[in-house]
Image: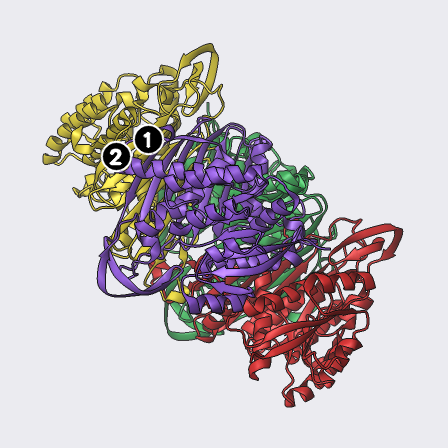
Chain colours: A yellow, B green, C red, D purple
């Protein structure tokens, strides 16, 4: 008989929807599936909306109380897609209750929470309870191809890591003070939202970070207090409140292996809808990636003959590329949601087959390391000086 | 109570899988859904495989006999994804039995079949029975944006339509004689497979075609007879058989409105995984599209000031773009499968709300028109002269 | 003492200016130069303008009578950049007078002239008198790199040649009937102007052409008769005249080696300033080139490992690339005029060192072959049927 | 009678050659010319080489003593393309002798020199003696178009300036210690070489800089001492010496107007031959430029309708674009050397017509401002803290 895994979900709008979609596609896309996810319970703050979400997605029940999911013996996996300020408590409770736990990035609201979450996860791991932070972009086949090329030494010694994550959805001064713009809920602004991705990718592809230098700015200091909000959008009223998070965040990373890292994240980069341009240059080659064209990896090999060297655009949809065998024939592009499908399949497989989440999936340890760098970046930006990761 | 529609599916490998995925995503992506698809029966030639498919995708039963689907009173929609030689009979039977009918392109194995299918569909339509040929690429938001720009007159009078649909999966001489390489099953080679898409797009965006000139070639004349095959791949044995379809097909189109059309389709275009480059140039502007980067539309407006004119890359993932409101926030890319989801949602909505499939969806009439052009192209290629659509 | 070569120039506006620039840059760019060009005489129709040109460019004298150049014993090279209808006579006279002769494409106004010119050139060649048709784009380093890759077999057997040469300078219906729009002067429209380039490139990179199929169209049938004109621009008056040349010309080429060629040339392709997109696909690899980015060659090698294949963008400005050693350090781009510099340096070197103009330069034989294909194309377009090159 | 201007040139290899080329093309490209440059004297360190250069380029005499140029009454313009350590003395002498003075960037070897040079230039300017630092990239038509768009307010308030200037010619550890790698001659490494360009562009397009934060690194600490060297290349012997300049330099800029600037310059960016990617994002629009495709400007306008916004690729070769009227018809691309031609034409015109070098040309004041930022960057990199421009 087929193995099943009961799923408890926190969140139902943007990321909750993307994750639920991944669980629903898993059994027939990743065939034969390592286990069949059963959508048990979904939790959200608004009773009416969470009930509608349960109906829409096929969860057996809806609740406003996340402890219901922890107490449900039919749930084996907790997937926490709530705002950053409700990451820690439910994840800790789930892990202590022996539930495999998946959480959206960043791990916690702050470093203190992240450390605590990691410690609990470490204990649970000894009992075979899995944990993962959903850095889903690791699972783009083109990124996994970059990982392979680097691992094979095709880039040689790494000198440069660059990552610009650029958006422009916040440029309207009348865009309201949504949760992502409030420090008490989000921890920080674009820094924790988008630099988190770049830091995780830096660690995934280049290595550990030892020191950072940060620079942040808030271009619009006051915004309308929202009268309604969901996901990234929402409507503001006449009252205005102070924005206490960053609109743009620049960060330099000193890597253990000597590479220089340069990050830029902005919600004020007009024209960039969701550009995430990553460049890694080494002594033997280089790779470039842009999330806008996420099926493509640019690869330059110094080993090509001198008259025929150039960045080659690899369409990472061939059978030789990671995860592609589960999807469509070569040349048929994956979309953004499919990286989440790959990530969640990986987690379910790790749970079902007792495999290691690392190195492809980001564990709570990776989440903690990322948060250390994020925190050091914020401290550095405040103090206007370099901050060692071991100093915080 | 929510409306439901029972689905009968023919085919389970490549396209059958893509369509089933679309039906499964419909209820929670296109929310609130116009109707809930119920996966009733699935039909295929291999008993073991079709049974496995039923289990994998959640169909209530599997059958090798497509008439079972026609006879099932719980089925309201027949979705025919079988090889081209089993398009006509099941579709006709379904329409006559009062079932809404969706079929993969091309409509029939040949023009004779297509005509017959259209006639039956026309009769059924009078009773409210819907028909659609699944030219799914019409439903890429970037293509619908092109449609809008053209309709608004932003391109002016159209002078040029160009479409190169290029692949390279057939270049290995040891690739076996799969069904797509056999005239009796596929009708033609790359001509009916890929030029069909370009012709439909030409009609969708530019208008009716009056005369054509064709040129085809078969580069590899003999191939191994397959000992197993599924989808686009498969294995060949020692025996070799003649290839009686085209590997490359070039086609010129004379449009009613005076535009010149130029098509090229090839399975021997090394390096092109699934390039479909479409260019439409008019007196006031131009648009370019490439399926490889299907979220993007290039648009040149002659109305921009002279010093600031250029092709602009529109990322068609904004709320203002068709279908995007159902998906993810701006900047989150759709994948290939999602065009199918949009197409099938459109059909289900037309069925549920008694709306017209046209002009966005391709009806059997569009399928027939496309097949006329395809057939005229083959005749022209044989005779090596221009052939009027009204001559065939 | 340094060798010198006296230059006689016909034409002073667009191409005459580009060629004169090439002669002037030769001594210090292509250092040490094979010979020093001395600008002797320049010929044009308008006395005042040709005198000004002589002064501007440093020619010793100006004349309205091209025979003056032929009769000048100090002139060793005639460079004919006049309109197409004055190619034949001066070139023939020059060759018969023992002057090395360079002519802008196309060779003659029509096939008859081209044949005659070739015959005279052939005789002269036996006496060491050189001839070249200035297909300058052959001398873009990226094109010569393509030539090298093809010669080395890195593309294998060629299946497809595609070339779209697209402009939009003629779209304004009030653009006057300049010489390029009059059959008696230009021979044909965009066909002889731009398809000439594509045909020469097809022969240069793929091989001989055996049969063609053509399709032409004139979108704007009447235009203002010009009251002044120079180069591509000019002003029209109130009188209107009939356009008797093509605005767009499509051409299919059957190559001796079995490849399929597909050409499109248009002056009505809105947004394309001077796009010349060339694609060559073979059994082992492919190359793409676009004149808009003429320092770049895209190269796809089927020999790269399956997981790392892709079109690589080679910036052809490295020391290993043809002609680059004469120019700037790697990464410093050449412009359009520099291909002409390379071409003219090649011709001067062939003259000075008694080297063969072929295979890199196009001889009058190449010009003749090109013109045969052009003429066959026009005949085919009129008859609306395939025409063999040996039939004309 | 036509005005002439005698030219005295320091340097004959890379930049000296590019500038001489510009003076030679000026009279017939920029027609009618504001004055005719006469190539009087050229100065270099190696007697044999400078004599050959004089012959090659057509200078009347060669000298190893730059004072000869200052003392020559027939010279009106001194163009100093020597290494950075011989910028100050000759320029100062020339200005004091009443000669219009042009110098390659950076202005001086260090800030002290730059200040002195500026003071002398300021005095000379009062007597009508012109000065310019040859930041030639300002004169790319696409950059001047960006300047226009910004000036017209089409970008609104500027939030972000990004500039990555990336090369890879130094990655071979056996590349010798050429002059650009020695602090006493070059002042700094890639910082003064390439960040100088980015800083000037930042000031040109965005505005004054108030504070900086720098980070530099030397990846290869020892290199062979050269036995011969010219321009960027050369050969090393067995002896090795210490590299005392930076291989990579990152720099953050705080602008007076509140914008954030982020610069990266590297000679260790594998695969980038001479990538200079500039991005400027404001509240209303954005522009992108890459030196690799220097005829193109990407422009995003927030004023386009929401469904049709995107970065448009403007090919800046239309008559409406700066300097283009002197060159070729639309669509015919300029090369790298042509920006120098434009720059030198501008300077000659300013001299001949007593026009202001500013705002399009960079004056010694601009050179000084640039050098202040460069110096602040180096100090910041050493101290690892932000440094105000007014602190140095």
Front residue (pair C250, D280): D280
Q: Is residue A78 visible?
A: no
Residue drawn at x 39%, y 36% as measured from the top left: D373
Residue designated by label 1: D387
Q: Residue at x 66, y 66 (%)?
A: C20
Q: Quadrant of residue A255?
A: top left
Q: Could you say which disc has been placed on residue D383 in the image? A: 2
Q: Residues within 10 Å of mark 1 (few under 14, many from 20)?
A: many
Task: Measure the alpha-carbon separation of dots 2 and 1.
Answer: 9 Å
Q: Does residue D72 lie above or below B204 as drawn?
A: below
Is D26 situated left or right of A283 in this image?
right
Callout 2 touching callout 1 (CB < 8 Å)? yes
Badge 2: chain ID:
D
Dot 2 lies on which element?
helix
Screen quadrant of the C terminus of chain A: top left
Examine the rendered structure and indicate whether residue D326 appears above or below residue B245: above
**Residue shown at 59% from the left, 40% from the top:** D128
Report the quarter where the N terminus of chain A lies. top left
């Amino acid at each position: 008989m087929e193995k099943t895994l009961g799923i408890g979900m926190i969140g139902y709008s943007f990321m909750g929807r993307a994750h639920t979609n991944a669980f629903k596609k898993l059994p027939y896309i990743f065939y034969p599936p390592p286990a069949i996810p059963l959508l048990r319970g979904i939790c959200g703050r608004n009773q009416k909306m969470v009930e509608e979400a349960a109906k829409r997605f096929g969860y057996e029940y809806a609740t406003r109380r996340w402890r219901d999911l922890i107490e449900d013996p039919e749930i084996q996996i907790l997937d926490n897609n709530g705002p950053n300020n409700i990451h820690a408590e439910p994840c800790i409770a789930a892990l202590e209750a022996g539930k495999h736990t998946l959480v959206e990035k960043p791990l916690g609201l702050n470093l203190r929470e992240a450390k605590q979450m990691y410690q609990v996860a470490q204990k649970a791991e000894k009992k075979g309870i899995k944990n993962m932070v959903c850095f889903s972009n690791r699972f783009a086949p083109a990124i996994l191809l970059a990982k392979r090329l680097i691992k094979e030494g095709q880039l040689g010694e790494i000198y440069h890591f660059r990552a610009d994550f650029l958006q422009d959805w916040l440029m309207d001064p009348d865009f309201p003070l949504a949760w992502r713009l409030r420090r008490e809920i989000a921890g920080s602004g674009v820094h924790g939202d988008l630099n988190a991705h770049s830091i995780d990718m830096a660690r995934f592809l280049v290595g550990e970070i030892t020191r950072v230098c940060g620079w942040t700015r808030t271009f619009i200091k006051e915004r309308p207090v929202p009268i309604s909000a969901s996901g990234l959008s929402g409507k503001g009223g006449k009252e205005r409140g102070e924005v206490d998070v960053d609109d743009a965040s620049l960060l330099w990373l000193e890597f253990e292996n000597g590479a220089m890292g340069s990050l830029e994240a902005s919600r004020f980069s007009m024209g960039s809808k969701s550009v995430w341009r990553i460049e890694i240059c080494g002594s033997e080659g280089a790779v470039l990636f842009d999330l806008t064209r996420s099926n493509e990896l640019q690869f330059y090999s110094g080993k090509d003959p001198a008259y025929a060297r150039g960045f080659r655009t690899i369409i990472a949809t061939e059978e030789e590329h990671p995860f592609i065998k589960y999807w469509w024939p070569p040349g048929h592009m994956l979309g953004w949601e499919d990286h989440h499908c790959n990530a969640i399949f990986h987690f379910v497989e790790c749970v079902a087959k007792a495999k290691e989440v690392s190195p492809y999936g980001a564990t709570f340890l990776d989440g903690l390391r990322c948060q250390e760098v994020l925190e050091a970046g914020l401290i550095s930006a405040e103090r206007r000086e370099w901050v060692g990761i071991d100093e915080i």
